[in-house]
Image (tube, helix red, strand yellow):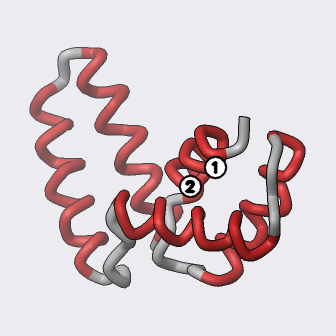
Amino acid sequence: MRRAVKQRKDSIEQYEKGGRMDLVEAEKAELQILESYLPQGMSDQELEAAVRAIVAEKGFTNARDVGPLMKEVMARHRGRVDGKRAQEIARQLLP
């Protein structure tokens, strides 16, 4: 399901660049249906709080710790986390 959602999001982006609004609307409709079957994702605030908690708990301090941090975030919050967004937050927190 997640792969199908990602494919729809990528397709929407490409169709918007190509000016194919008819296809954008069709993909958005499919995306909405697919997302209704997935568990509710974490908000940005919840995700940032979770990442901060893991950083504090594990004592991560620099950019080299992003990999282990991401592994821990994804393990604890499987199915509710957008990995790309989590990585952005991790990189902001660990200079």
Whether residue 84 sits left or right of residue 25 in the image: it is right
User: Which residue does the numbered mark 2 point to in the structure image?
Assistant: 86
Crowd rating for badge 2 (residues with CA inside 10 Å; few <14, some 14–19, many 20+): many
Identify the image quadrant of residue 57: bottom right
**Residue at 59% over, 80% down:** 78
Instruction: Residue under label 1, please give it.
Output: 90
In front of the other: 53 or 9: 53
Q: CA distance from mark 2 to mark 1?
A: 6 Å
| Element class at badge 2 | helix
- Tag 2: residue type? Ala
**The furthest residue to the right:** 64
- The picture places residue 92, in percent across and down from the top left corner, at 59, 39
Determine whether the residue tagged by mark 1 lies in a helix, strand or loop: helix
- Relative vertical location of residue 51 with respect to residue 66 in this rendering, above or below: below
| Residue 31 disc label | none
In the image: residue 44, left or right of residue 84: left
Query: Neighbour class for label 1 at 10 Å: few (<14), some, many (≥20)?
Result: many
Q: Answer with the quarter of the image where residue 43 lies.
A: bottom left
Expressed as whole percent of the image width and height from the top left, the position of residue 63 reads: 81, 40
Mark 2 touching mark 1, by CB under 8 A? yes
Q: Nearer the viewer, residue 83 or 12?
A: 83
Give percent across and percent down for residue 91.
66, 40
Q: Residue at x 53, y 71 (%)?
A: 50
The structure residue drawn at horizontal position 82% and vertical position 43%, both measured from the top left corner, is: 62
User: What amino acid is labelled 1 in the image?
Assistant: Ala
Between tags 2 and 1, which lies in front?
A: 1
Q: Is residue 20 above or below residue 32?
A: above
Q: Is 19 rendered above or below residue 14?
A: above
